[in-house]
Amino acid sequence: MRRTCHPWLRGDFAATPGLRQRPVHYLAGMVDASGATPSSGTFVPPGFAPPGSMTGEGFRLEPLGPEHNERDHAAWMSSVEFIHALPGFENSDWPSPMTLDENLADLDAHAKDFVDRSGFTYSILDGDDVVGCVYIYPTADPGHDARITSWVTEDRASMESSVRKTIEHWIRAEWPFESPYIP
């Protein structure tokens, strides 16, 4: 049986200055006719437990949170142009320079999305070094029930293809999506 998206999940992704990509419904605070909001947890089934981590060859994922602030900020700030060239980020306003405090607010918002089950963001780590991120959010793309994007730092470009393939396999094996869009 195919899951259908609620009307508030049909927005596209957008970015605002100082924030990473978020579904438009998240930014606009949209609700459907029943009053449902992204925080009502309908992006994933109620019984689904989002993975707390994943280990791949040469990296691991863990939920992005405020504890990653300085390392995350340094990682993406070192690779702004490179990230803009990666699939899914070509037309994004993010990344663009922001302060450490603005980045912390962004990480807090991603952590809240995770708790609210309205989106899931993971740090890509090599040891304790943040070398990228994975974003799992609702999509407006017809025929898809989630949009997954990821980036690695320019100095880890050689691992980008392997990370992308591992994440795609992980999404298809461990997540409840029938047709995820992975640019």
Image (spheres, rainbow, N blue to C red):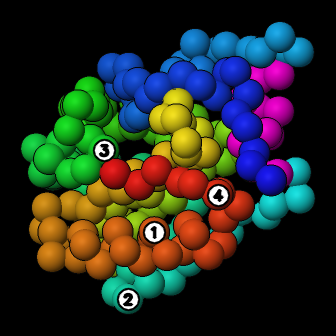
In percent of the image, x 15 and y 76: which residue is there? 158
Q: Residue under circle 3? A: 88
The nearer-to-camera label among 4 and 3 is 4
The reply to whether the magenta stretch includes residue 73 is no
Q: Residue under circle 2? A: 57
- Compare marks 4 and 2 and give the one earlier in the sequence: 2
Asked if the residues shown at circle 4 and circle 3 are in contact, with their CB atoms under 8 angstroms apart, the answer is no
Residue 98 seen by the camera: yes
Residue 66 seen by the camera: no
Q: Is residue 116 left or right of residue 135?
A: right
Q: Residue under circle 1? A: 168
Q: Report the front residue among 27 and 44.
A: 44
The nearer-to-camera label among 4 and 2 is 4
Name the disc covering residue 178, or none.
4
In percent of the image, x 14 and y 47: which residue is there? 85
Amino acid at pointer 4 = Glu
- Compare marks 2 and 1 and give the one earlier in the sequence: 2
Asked if the residues shown at circle 2 and circle 3 are in contact, with their CB atoms under 8 angstroms apart, the answer is no
Give the distance between the C-alpha atoms of the residues marked 2 and 3, in whole angstroms. 23 Å
Give the distance between the C-alpha atoms of the residues marked 1 and 4, in whole angstroms. 13 Å
- Compare marks 4 and 3 and give the one earlier in the sequence: 3
Amino acid at pointer 2 = Glu
What segment is highlighted magenta in the picture? 36-45
